[in-house]
Image (spheres, helix red, strand yellow):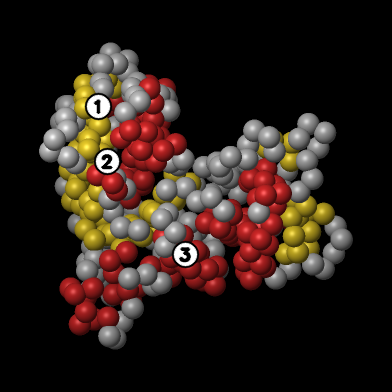
């Protein structure tokens, strides 16, 4: 995606942001980073015609409108993609959820109709049914759109669940609940990538030998592993929280068929600094393979590995989230002596700092 424009969504009153291959959002708690990432969840549910249920389970339309329905009447967005395609919509509250009062397909050509209007004042999108080439392009992007969140590593975490090697191996699920079947598919179909994943995990956890990927009679499989120091077979709960998360991140970023975009909230949680450095390397690697990365973080260790142009500060001022991409020219007089994380710690990068007023 080249550009995203949003109006009236949660803490985002208005936003017009050009997206780069790497987009690292930094900011205080409550600044609006998570609201920005949650917009991609909204997009995914719009594409899958699940908007009505998604909104209802999260408190109704008022929770999605900027400062509520007394202040904001609608949510508007326009997404601009490469090859001059675009998608836009306007949502207004109805009796039982949001209604699409506008849903448009764009092609940047003055000799073509723009936008092609596909809305029918219904509660769900019509995008999935449209046969125009530009609709197919946008659907291709949205098909694999997910916001990843690998925070839950407890006894009953998603990583502890069984998954099916026939039904759950097409893409990694948002919380990693099908990681065993996804890894099994990589092992079966791309052994070289699988071996790279193993070596990357071993670089952070030297005691880790390999996964034990054995489906049962119903083709269900759970994540199990073996230590280099023992023949005992271990489960997910025998790994530290940080190691579990690093395994999930490694599988996500090293999978053989990368999605168009990887969106992830606080991937650094629980990671050792050496694992954070590996994570930064994986982010840079996929960004050079036509996979756009959007990350929200509060880790100074993570941002120290990136250029100023990769970083977007997020501040909330009078209840409105303000996004600003950093610039090497602006920071050039400091970068000879300090790193990006130093500048943030020293409040020289003033954006994304806590506001105690």
**Numbered label attached to residue 103:** 1
Q: Which residue is mark 3?
A: 285
Sequence-wise, the earlier of marks 2 and 1 is 2
- Identity of the residue furthest to the top in this view: 95
Image position, residue 24 (x, y; %): 35, 59
Sequence-wise, the earlier of marks 3 and 2 is 2
Q: Nearer the viewer, mark 3 or mark 2?
A: 2
Regarding mark 3 in the picture, which secondary structure is present there? helix
Q: CA distance from mark 2 to mark 1?
A: 14 Å
Image position, residue 139 (x, y; %): 39, 34
Check disc 2: other Cα within 10 Å, few if <14, some if 14-19, many if 20+.
some
Location of the C terminus by quadrant is: bottom left
Regarding mark 1 in the picture, which secondary structure is present there? strand
- Vertical order, 348 against 44 (above or below): below
Q: Which residue is mark 2?
A: 85
Q: Which residue is drawn at the image coordinates 42% and 48% (left, top)?
A: 260
Q: Which residue is drawn at the image coordinates 19% and 38% (left, top)?
A: 7
């Amino acid at each position: 995606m080249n550009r995203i424009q949003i109006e009236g969504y949660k803490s985002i009153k208005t936003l017009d942001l050009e997206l780069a291959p790497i987009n690292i959002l930094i900011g205080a708690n409550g600044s609006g980073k998570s609201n920005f990432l949650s917009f991609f969840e909204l997009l995914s549910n719009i594409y899958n015609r699940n908007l009505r249920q998604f909104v209802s389970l999260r408190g109704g339309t008022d929770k999605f409108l900027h400062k509520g329905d007394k202040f904001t009447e609608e949510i508007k967005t326009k997404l601009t993609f490469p090859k001059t395609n675009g998608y836009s919509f306007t949502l207004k509250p109805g009796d039982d959820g949001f209604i699409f009062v506008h849903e448009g397909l764009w092609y940047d050509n003055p000799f073509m109709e723009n936008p092609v209007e596909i809305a029918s004042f219904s509660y769900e999108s019509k995008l999935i049914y449209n046969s125009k080439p530009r609709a197919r392009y946008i659907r291709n992007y949205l098909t694999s759109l997910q916001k990843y969140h690998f925070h839950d590593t407890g006894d009953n975490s998603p990583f502890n669940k069984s998954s099916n090697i026939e039904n759950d191996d097409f893409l990694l699920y948002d919380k990693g609940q099908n990681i065993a079947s996804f890894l099994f598919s990589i092992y079966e179909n791309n052994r070289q990538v699988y071996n790279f994943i193993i070596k990357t995990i071993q670089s952070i956890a030297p005691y880790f030998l390999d996964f034990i990927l054995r489906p049962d009679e119903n083709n269900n499989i759970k994540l199990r592993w073996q230590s280099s120091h023992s023949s005992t077979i271990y489960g997910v709960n025998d790994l530290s929280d940080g190691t579990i998360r690093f395994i999930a991140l490694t599988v996500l970023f090293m999978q053989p068929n990368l999605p168009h975009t990887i969106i992830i909230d606080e991937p650094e949680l629980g990671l050792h600094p050496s694992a954070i450095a590996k994570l930064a390397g994986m982010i840079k690697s996929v960004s050079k393979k036509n996979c756009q990365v959007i990350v929200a973080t509060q880790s100074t260790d993570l941002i120290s590995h990136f250029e100023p142009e990769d970083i977007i500060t997020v501040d909330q001022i009078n209840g409105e989230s303000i996004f600003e991409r950093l610039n090497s020219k602006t920071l050039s007089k400091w970068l000879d002596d300090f790193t990006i994380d130093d500048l943030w710690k020293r409040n020289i990068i003033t954006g994304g700092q806590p506001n105690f007023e």
